[in-house]
């Protein structure tokens, strides 16, 4: 596997991934003022992803291009909003306060690096379920609309929601990377996000930073079901829903 090719995919995905979820993240940031800024950021990013996936589902019922146009407009507006909010509140941030989250940054970075490794040894993500999900994402990119059946492979109806598949298709189109690479990179991004979420939940539940860090570490590096096992069977929709 050519490492430069992987890096190009990572750069394209990294430049595009915030594009899709920023509108929702800006909205969530507005209403999560009671939390510390880093925790507020994590929850806003997760909420932004959830809103992006749902919006993709609704808009792609009409047309995938419509979804992309809508996000371009929303992205521009919310970027200006966040810049204005940062300028207004930057005096409230301190490096000392942010440094207490160094352990969280280290754990999340480790979780992401661990899950990036398979991208360097295999072109395609593993797991039997991966094939089925990529077929549906491919139908979305070809037809520009959500599919209602599995034709030409099977003459049966699709029996679950396709918001995540529309999101894969949109990221692939906007980043200019193949669907299977977008699929794999979204799995990696969700692993980092869910690790950070476990930390935030643990801190607010236990009220102790040490237990929150231990919870995030256990989830990222020890837990199998709901964490590392997704990479064995390609459970991106399940991982998305859990996040």
Image (cartoon, grey):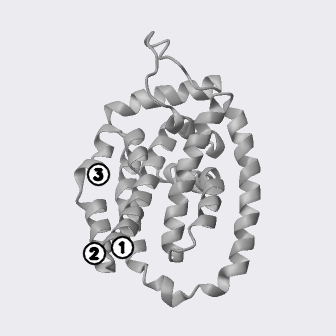
Please give the residue where the numbered disc 2 appears in the rendered image. Answer: 211
- The circle on residue 35 is none
Q: Secondary structure at mark 2?
A: helix
Answer yes or no: do the residues labelled 1 and 2 have beta carbons within 8 Å?
Answer: yes
Among the two numbered marks 3 and 1 on one chain, the one whose residue lies closer to the N terminus: 1
Among the two numbered marks 3 and 2 on one chain, the one whose residue lies closer to the N terminus: 2
**3D distance between C-alphas at marks 3 and 1:** 22 Å
Q: Residue at x 41, y 48 (%)?
A: 119
In the image, taking residue 115 as reference, residue 59 lies left or right, namely right
Q: Secondary structure at mark 3?
A: helix
Residue 76 image offset from top left, x and y in percent: 76, 56
Q: Residue at x 49, y 12 (%)?
A: 152
Q: Residue at x 27, y 75 (%)?
A: 211
- Residue in front for this viewpoint, 36 or 9: 36
The number of callouts visible is: 3
Please give the residue where the numbered disc 3 appears in the rendered image. Answer: 228
Please give the residue where the numbered disc 1 appears in the rendered image. Answer: 203
Residue 74 image offset from top left, x and y in percent: 73, 51
Q: Is residue 56 above or below residue 106?
A: above
Answer yes or no: do the residues labelled 3 and 2 have beta carbons within 8 Å?
Answer: no
**3D distance between C-alphas at marks 3 and 2:** 21 Å
């Amino acid at each position: 596997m050519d490492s430069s090719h992987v890096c190009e995919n990572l750069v394209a995905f990294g430049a595009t991934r915030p594009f899709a979820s920023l509108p929702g993240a800006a909205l969530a940031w507005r209403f999560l003022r009671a939390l510390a800024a880093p925790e507020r950021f994590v929850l806003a990013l997760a909420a932004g992803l959830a809103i992006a996936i749902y919006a993709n589902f609704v808009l792609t019922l009409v047309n995938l291009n419509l979804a992309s146009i809508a996000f371009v407009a929303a992205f521009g507006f919310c970027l200006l909003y966040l810049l204005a909010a940062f300028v207004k509140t930057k005096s409230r941030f301190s490096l000392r306060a942010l440094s207490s989250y160094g352990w969280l940054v280290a754990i999340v970075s480790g979780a992401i690096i661990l899950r990036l490794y398979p991208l360097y040894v295999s072109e395609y993500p593993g797991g039997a379920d991966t094939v089925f999900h990529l077929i549906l994402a491919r139908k979305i990119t070809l037809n520009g609309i959500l599919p209602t059946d599995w034709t030409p492979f099977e003459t049966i109806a699709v029996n679950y929601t396709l918001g995540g598949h529309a999101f894969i298709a949109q990221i692939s189109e906007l980043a200019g990377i193949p669907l299977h690479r977008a699929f794999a990179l979204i799995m990696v991004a969700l692993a980092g996000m869910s690790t950070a979420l476990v930390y935030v939940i643990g801190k607010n539940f236990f009220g102790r930073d040490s237990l929150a860090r231990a919870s995030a570490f256990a989830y990222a590096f020890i837990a199998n079901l709901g964490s590392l096992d997704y990479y064995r069977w390609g459970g991106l929709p399940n991982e998305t829903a859990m996040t």
